[in-house]
């Protein structure tokens, strides 16, 4: 083995084994709490191989299986343009002999470092699995789950935990765009007597995964509303009456903090749908010249934050 390869086969194998055992144990012991994405993965097998990163990318281009995402980003260029060391361990997971997902390790790194380079998903379910794992590592019972791993598997869980604790930001960037500071100066109605940004208290916050329909029922159909996606991917909505001379605007929804996206909401009485757009010079001005990306981000708001609600994108 090349002297530059400092992570040996056993270590890479144990990373794959630890993930597999962790999910398998949790799926079996806590079926009531287990995310549905874990069920499919629990029956997956895995293979581990040492690869040149250049050959890995060439194989990726020539592969006959589908690609869904790399670190939560759907563009294949995110993987092909990623900086990687010369040597990479690929831990490949297969479901019923079909390629399901890969996790890539820096073969030239050290166990104490950030060894996980990224994770590839080849199906929508695989992408959902990596996202569910990123949520799982933040839960209190994750510590208990890792302590139940077979003692024959060395403690490789640290590199997995470190990577997935930060993974959520990757897919939030892909779904809604990166965080942006307010792109304009505050209006007089948006600051207090001391010039500090006002934070509105009359807003509703819809945390991803919660029942959004019940929250939307509290909105006044006679009023226009503004909304933002905050740094955590949650939706914040506030009234913005058209005839209000003291409009608070988008920055007041976040207290002047960075957000990923913003826009307006209007109720359509003809069929009872809320229509959303990305009209916010504060947080979405960069999308005005890129309607395709704006539509993609808005689609994420509807599917991730307002699933099951009567909402749609406003036609241009």
Image (cartoon, rainbow, N blue to C red):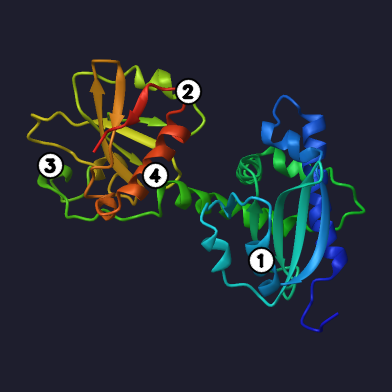
Q: Residues within 10 Å of mark 3 (few under 14, many from 20)?
A: some
- Does residue 117 appear left or right of residue 245 in this picture? right
Q: Earlier in the sequence, mark 3 or mark 4?
A: 3
- The residues tagged by marks 3 and 4 sit, at their Cα atoms, a distance apart of 29 Å
Q: Distance between the Cα atoms at labels 3 and 1?
A: 46 Å
**Disc number at residue 297?**
4
Q: CA distance from mark 1 to mark 4?
A: 30 Å
Q: Earlier in the sequence, mark 2 or mark 3?
A: 3
Q: Which residue is mark 2?
A: 211
Residue 76 falls left or right of residue 230: right
* Residue 51 appears anywhere in the view: yes
> Given contact means CB atoms under 8 Å apart, are the residues at marks 4 and 2 in contact?
no
Q: For the point 58% across and 52% down, which residue is it? A: 69
Closer-to-camera residue (123/249): 123
Is there CB contact under 8 Å for labels 3 and 4?
no
Camera-nearest residue between 261 and 151: 261
Q: CA distance from mark 2 to mark 3?
A: 32 Å
Residue drawn at (24%, 21%) of the image = 268
At a point 75% along the width and 62% down the height, the residue shown is: 90
Q: Are marks 1 and 4 in contact (CB under 8 Å)?
A: no
Could you say whether the residue bearing mark 2 is in a helix, strand or loop?
A: loop
Q: Secondary structure at mark 4?
A: helix
Question: Which of pointers 3 and 1 lies earlier in the amino acid sequence?
Answer: 1
Image coords of residue 283 (percent x, y): 28, 49
Q: Of discs 3 and 4, which sits in the foreground? A: 4
Q: Earlier in the sequence, mark 4 or mark 2?
A: 2
Circle 2 or circle 3, nearest the eye = 2
Q: Which residue is mark 3?
A: 189
Q: Tell me, yes or no, if residue 234 can be seen here.
A: no
How many angstroms separate mark 2 from mark 1 (CA)? 36 Å
């Amino acid at each position: 083995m090349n002297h530059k390869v400092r992570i040996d086969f056993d270590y890479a194998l144990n990373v794959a084994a630890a993930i597999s055992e962790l999910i398998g144990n949790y799926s079996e012991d806590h079926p009531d709490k287990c995310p549905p994405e874990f069920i499919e993965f629990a029956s997956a097998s895995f293979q581990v191989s040492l690869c040149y990163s250049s050959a890995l990318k060439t194989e990726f281009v020539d592969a006959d299986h589908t690609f869904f995402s790399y670190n939560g980003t759907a563009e294949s260029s995110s993987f092909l343009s990623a900086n990687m060391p010369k040597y990479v361990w690929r831990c490949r997971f297969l479901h019923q002999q079909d390629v399901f997902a890969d996790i890539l390790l820096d073969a030239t790194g050290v166990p104490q470092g950030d060894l996980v380079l990224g994770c590839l998903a080849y199906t929508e379910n695989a992408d959902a699995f990596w996202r569910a794992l990123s949520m799982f590592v933040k839960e209190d019972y994750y510590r208990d789950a890792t302590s139940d791993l077979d003692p024959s598997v060395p403690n490789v869980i640290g590199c997995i935990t470190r990577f997935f604790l930060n993974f959520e930001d990757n897919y939030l960037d892909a779904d809604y765009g990166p965080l942006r500071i307010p792109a304009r100066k505050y209006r007089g109605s948006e600051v207090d007597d001391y010039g500090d940004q006002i934070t509105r208290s009359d807003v509703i916050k819809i945390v991803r995964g919660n029942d959004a329909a019940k929250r939307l029922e509290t909105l006044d159909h006679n009023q226009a509303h503004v909304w933002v996606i905050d740094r955590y991917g949650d939706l914040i909505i506030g009234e913005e009456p058209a005839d209000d001379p003291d409009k608070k605007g988008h920055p007041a929804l976040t207290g002047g903090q960075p957000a990923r996206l913003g826009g307006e909401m209007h109720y359509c009485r003809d069929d009872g749908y809320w229509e959303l757009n990305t009209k916010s010079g504060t947080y979405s001005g960069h999308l005005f010249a890129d309607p395709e990306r704006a539509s993609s981000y808005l689609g994420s708001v509807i599917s991730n934050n307002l699933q099951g609600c009567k909402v749609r994108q406003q036609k241009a």
